[in-house]
Image (cartoon, grey):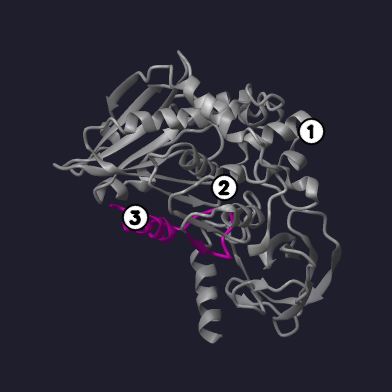
Amino acid sequence: MKKITLLLFILLATHVAKSQNYPADSDVLWVTKPNNSDWLYKINEKAKVTVEFYLYGVLQKDIVINYSIGPELMKADKEGTIKLINGKAELELGTLSKPGFVDCKLKVEINRFKYSHHIKVGFEPEKLKPYTQFPADFTTFWDNAKAEAAKCPVKVEKTFAPEYSSDKIDCYLVRLQAYKEGYCVYGYLSIPKREGKFPVVFSPPGAGVKPMDPLKHMFYPEDGVIRFDMEIHGIRPDLDAKTYKEISRSFGGGDNSYLINGIEDRDKYYMKKVYLSCIRVIDYLTTLPEWDGKNLIAQGGSQGGALALTTTALDSRITACAAAHPALIDMAGYLDNRAGGYPHLYTQYKNMDKPDIIKTLQYYDVVNFAKLIKVPVFMTWGFNDNVCPPTTSYIVYNAITANKKSLITPVNEHWVSENTRRVIFAWIKTQLK
């Protein structure tokens, strides 16, 4: 137990700069430790957490902390205060009578500054099941959609990107016509600069309308793997941030979000062209003369994790899939009085409980695609994630019947460490034929 506690403390401290719980340049550090070291409990088992609070690295004593406890992303059902006696307090989190997560939120004010923190624990989440129904014509709908999209020729424009190239990598900005005549997507294609044939990793993007570049994963082509980092909206990814911000105002968020564009009609929903464009990108990648003809892996995080899973289900050419905290899972789960998946339609948007919308979601929810996957899958997610909550990650993981492996990192919010990126890549390499 001492080793586990020390490891947890180190893990918390080393991720100060990346997580919401531990923001960069903060004077404070919260240390919250559940009484079960894996943060998991049996249904009806009582959970507890000890709380410590450090200011400038000094353990604070006799301060009062406000807390609220309740089901993940739902209204709290218990509130109160605790006092840190000799710098520590133990807080009863209660239990659940069915699978799910409890979230404990903490707040304190010191020297007129307010600090907050939260921690989630799970109760038999391996038993979580989706609320979303699987339509009888699900596969027929997507087979027909793919056949229609395939009639549009893939037209490619490839421009050398010297700013991302090196003595080891040739990088190109690629524009592809996909889905329908005149509709395009972009991506950065990074190819090892040496003789040979290489595996291909297809990587769709996270949510939003924003600039992108391939720098974060350049270690893939450096290690002999072709990588395609995709853009889904048909907007050049190398535009400046100010221009992207202006574009994003038009359809990037709120009631103008692309994520609800056409959502009342399964044939007009914005994400239809996104899902199909991913397939057309695969059509292109399988024509690359540098591809080894055997290995084609889908990999992404958040919305990118969702698209990696859906593309794997829709395209038998994908040989393995790696997804981090995927979005778009059991989005209607809120209608079952529990956390649903990003983009949180039933808490962040209005009038989403219409029958037509609920029906449309069934054809786009990742959990229904997951049931069709036949190749190996690697998934990683954290418990403290409020963007893509662990409830939905477990739901999709539980739905996968193919060979699967998980890396569960309880402390994580909506981020992936550099180390975990390397773990994902290491798993991908184990799947190469």
Give the answer, above or below, for where 262 lies relative to 368. above
Q: Nearer the viewer, residue 412 or 353?
A: 353
- Asked if residue 248 lies left or right of residue 377, the reply is right
> Which numbered marker is on residue 431?
3
Of circles 2 and 3, the one toward us is 2
Badge 2 or badge 1: first in the primary sequence: 1
Residue at the spot 49% in from the left edge and 31% down from the top edge: 241
Q: Nearer the viewer, residue 317 or 188?
A: 317
Q: Nearer the viewer, residue 411 or 162?
A: 411
Residue 310 position within the rendered picture, expressed as x and y whole percent measured from the top left: 52, 40
Q: Are marks 2 and 3 in contact (CB under 8 Å)?
A: no
Per the image, the residue denoted by label 2 is: 371
Distance between the Cα atoms at labels 1 and 3?
Answer: 43 Å
Instruction: State the extent of the magenta-drawn residues as a range.
Output: 404-433
Give the answer, above or below, for where 360 lies relative to 199. above
> Which numbered marker is on residue 240?
none
At label 1, which amino acid type do we have?
A: Lys
Residue 283 position within the rendered picture, expressed as x and y whole percent measured from the top left: 36, 29
Distance between the Cα atoms at labels 2 and 3?
Answer: 20 Å
Residue 357 position within the rendered picture, expressed as x and y whole percent measured from the top left: 74, 31
At label 2, which amino acid type do we have?
A: Lys
Q: Quadrant of the N terminus?
A: bottom right
| Residue reaching furthest to the left | 195
| Residue reaching furthest to the top | 181
Give the answer, above or below, for where 244 lies relative to 51. above
At label 3, which amino acid type do we have?
A: Gln
Question: Dot 2, how many residues are within 10 Å of its Cα: few (below 14), some (14-19), or many (20+)?
Answer: some
Per the image, the residue denoted by label 1 is: 350
Residue at the spot 66% in from the left edge and 53% down from the top edge: 386
SS of the residue at dot 3?
A: loop
Badge 1 or badge 3: first in the primary sequence: 1
